[in-house]
Amino acid sequence: MATSDDRSARWNRYWDKKSRNYDREIGFFDRHLFGDSRQWVCSQATGDVLEVAIGTGLNLPFCPETVRPTGIDWSEQILDLARDRAADLGHPAVLQRADAHRLPFDDASFDAVVCPLGLCAIPNHTQALTEMTRVLRPGGRLVLVDHIRSSAAHWTTSLPLTASTLTASSGSPSGSSNGSSPVRPPRPDSPRAVVCPRRHHHERSRT
């Protein structure tokens, strides 16, 4: 049976190979599918921010100057590209190789955790989301956006957090939720989820 270390090594090799053409390939989707998703996610983050699956750092240009970003990814080669981008931007981002299923941070380390367009690349969503929630400070914010069909209601109800804004978009132009439970206002000390699985740039979760 493969261990978590074997899995991490396998994914590291896969994304190392993808690193050479990653920006060119993802650029097509940015232009034709993702719209302003990156800008929107970054606008939701404040304080100490962890980006899970940071990739080549395509979101760094949209980070507010007031945030203190940390980013993790499977691939060292992809992280090297992110480091180059951060240096070109003069951005003091802390970037390190890590497994999203086993985040190397203490509990309550971050004011916000973001995962823009990266959850689809993580094999075990529930485990990764549990880890993201663990490292959030009381009242922190988990911000997710992706281009794949998924159940945002499951993401929030299966984890110890309260959804303050929840739009489960499954291709509906209105961005309506299909079968989601009603969302209740969070307590001030509850981690908050701002979740927007999206397939079209006009589908938006609004705070």
Image: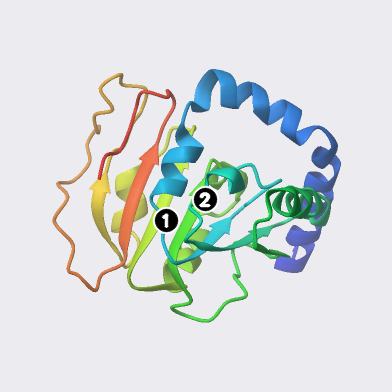
C-beta proximity under 8 Å, tags 1 and 2: yes
Which residue matches tag 1? 45
Which residue lies at the image location 52% right of the left edge and 50% below the top edge? Answer: 63
Say what amino acid the circle numbered 2 marks: Cys
* Residue 77 in the figure: left or right of residue 91: right
Which residue lies at the image location 32% right of the left edge and 68% below the top edge? Answer: 160
Label 2 secondary element: loop
Label 1 secondary element: loop
Q: Nearer the viewer, mark 1 or mark 2?
A: 2
Which residue lies at the image location 68% right of the left edge and 55% below the top edge? Answer: 90
* Residue 71 in the figure: left or right of residue 173: right
Count neighbours of disc 2 (C-alpha within 10 A) and say few if under 14, some if 14 to 19, many if 20 or more: many
Say what amino acid the circle numbered 1 marks: Ala
Measured Cα–Cα span from mark 1 to mark 2: 8 Å
Please identify the quarter of the rendering in which residue 170 is found: top left
Label whose residue precedes the other's in the sequence (1 or 2): 1
Please give the label number shown on residue 146.
none
Count neighbours of disc 1 (C-alpha within 10 A) and say few if under 14, some if 14 to 19, many if 20 or more: many
Which residue lies at the image location 76% right of the left edge and 55% below the top edge? Answer: 83
Query: Residue 165 appears at what percent x and percent y?
Result: 25, 48
Does 199 sit above or below residue 155? Answer: above
* Residue 148 in the figure: left or right of residue 154: right
Please give the label number shown on residue 63.
2
